[in-house]
Image (cartoon, helix red, strand yellow):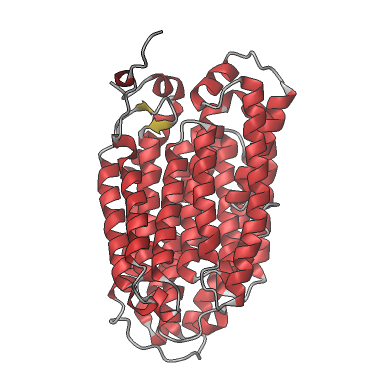
Amino acid sequence: MTPFNVTAINIVWLPILPMIVIAIAAMVVLLAGVRINEEDSEGLGWLTLAALFVAFILTLGIVGQSGVAFAGAISIDSFAAYFELAILIAAMFTVLMSLDYAGEHHIPGAEYYSLLLFSVLGMMLMATAGDLIIIFLGLETMSLSVYVLAGIARRDPKSNEAAIKYFLLGAFSTGFLLYGIALVYGATGTIKLGPIHTVLASGAMGSNRMLLLGIGMLLIGFAFKVAAVPFHMWTPDVYEGAPTPITAFMAVGVKLAAFAGFLRVFLVDLTPMTGEWSSVLWVVAALTMTGGNLMAIAQTNIKRMLAYSSIAHAGYLLVGMTAGAGAGGAILYYLVAYAFTNLGAFAVVIALERLGVPSNKISDYRGLGTRHPLLAGAMAVFLLSLTGVPPMAGFVGKFYLFYAALHQGYVGLVIIAVLNSVISTYYYFSVLVAMYMQEGGVEVSRLSARPALVAAIGLAAIATVVIGAYPQPYIGIASNAFHSASGAEGIHAASLEP
């Protein structure tokens, strides 16, 4: 019998080093926080921020590399690095918004920050996944953590309700995703994304019913995570009930991770089957844009309005996915522009919460331009970007995305998208009107005691303007990142293992 040769197993740790840092930091924060009171949890926040920054630096070392690791389970490319960096930035902004938040709201800081790190770990796994099982593991690691974070304000009934609704509907959607993975495996004989692409490209599958059903199940699972209509029902209630920093994290981080998996599976490895799923995605994109915008018009609660806005923006991104791989760079650029804009908008909501003034309703923003001009100015930047007003990042993102879809011949879908952008002007501008054209509201004190929160708002506002005013470098980075994944055959065949 041939002896088992341990030296034949080569493992490259570099691709997962940032994830190892995040995992260790999550356990350290949890253990370190055992004897720390809720009121003294700010130090845990700084420890979390330091771990995220170290992971960010390590991820930069992966940029430009290509290959696979762990027998193809992990993809190493600029696509993965792009999403990992974006997710880490979103998490760092969330921590900046959260410092002192746990203590003030009687939330256990150790659990709060460790769960935040574990959810980031799941998101990074989804971004780097090289097979369907890793996508599933990443999705579950992220989802279980976010379910708890949504309900971590245990004394708040709305937070409890948000967690229960998110958990029940999330578990249901996960069943669809897992069943879809099983059917795709049954049809193709593999869970590896590269070999799946190879099998489909060969034309050997034809119109295999098991494969088509599996793709449909995968589509439902991803549609739930990106809050696409008709799988959006959880979004407004969860966004309203969760602690506001977690709402911001869900609106950005969860969406980044979900689209990372969605894009890698559908726009890279299932491209030979585009004809089978693109028409379905066309309908979902149109319904998501229209439904999100129309429902947002009726909202008086700003978190629910931003929740429906998030649904509408998912619809715009699905327009790009419907257009296919040609819109890949546009989708990646739009996701980053959306991330900074939404993080900034929720940071302003948090700022008002922490100043002790009402901030749940749009009417609470009346006179903010007079009471706190800098805070109102930052909010105006974010709302104008969400609307798509130049030179903000949101305008460039929509222009780039719609142009890519138009170039692929989806004229009708682009017309629907443009009309929806016009509709969105109504509810975004209702906040601007309240801030600058109406009187009232409670006097706001200075934010000088919240330097981390001020930094989050300022950096988000600067990024929203700079990425929009000078978009070319960021468009180039986004395009190169997507193309690094779209060369799927070469990348999946390569390996960094010695």
| Farthest right residue in view | 209
Q: Nearer the viewer, residue 401 or 418?
A: 401
Please name whichever residue, 109 or 265, is drawn nearer the observer in this view of the structure.
Answer: 109
Q: Position of residue 384 (x, y in %)?
A: 46, 65
Q: Position of residue 286 (x, y in %)?
A: 67, 48
Give me the residue at 50% from left, 64% from top.
Answer: 149
Asked if residue 343 lies left or right of residue 60, the reply is right
Residue 38 position (above or below residue 463): below
447 shown above or below 143 = below
Outermost front residue: 1
Instruction: Inspect this view and state whether residue 475 appears.
Output: no
Instruction: Determine if residue 148 is in view.
Output: yes
x and y, in percent, of residue 8 in the image: 32, 18
User: In the rendered image of this protein, does residue 426 appear above or below residue 328?
Assistant: below
Q: Residue furthest top?
A: 1
Q: Quadrant of the N terminus?
A: top left
Residue 406, given in percent of the width and then of the height, sits at 56, 38
On the rendered structure, is 207 left or right of 27? right
Q: Residue visible at 70% across and 52% down?
A: 230
Of 214 and 277, nearer the camera is: 214
Q: Residue at x 44, y 86 (%)?
A: 356
Count every numbered label the image shows and give the total: 0
When the figure is inspected, residue 498 is found, relative to residue 51, above or below; the finding is: above
Quadrant of the drawing holding the C terminus = top left
Q: Nearer the viewer, residue 306 or 56?
A: 56
Q: Splitting the image into 4 quarters, where does residue 158 fall?
A: bottom right
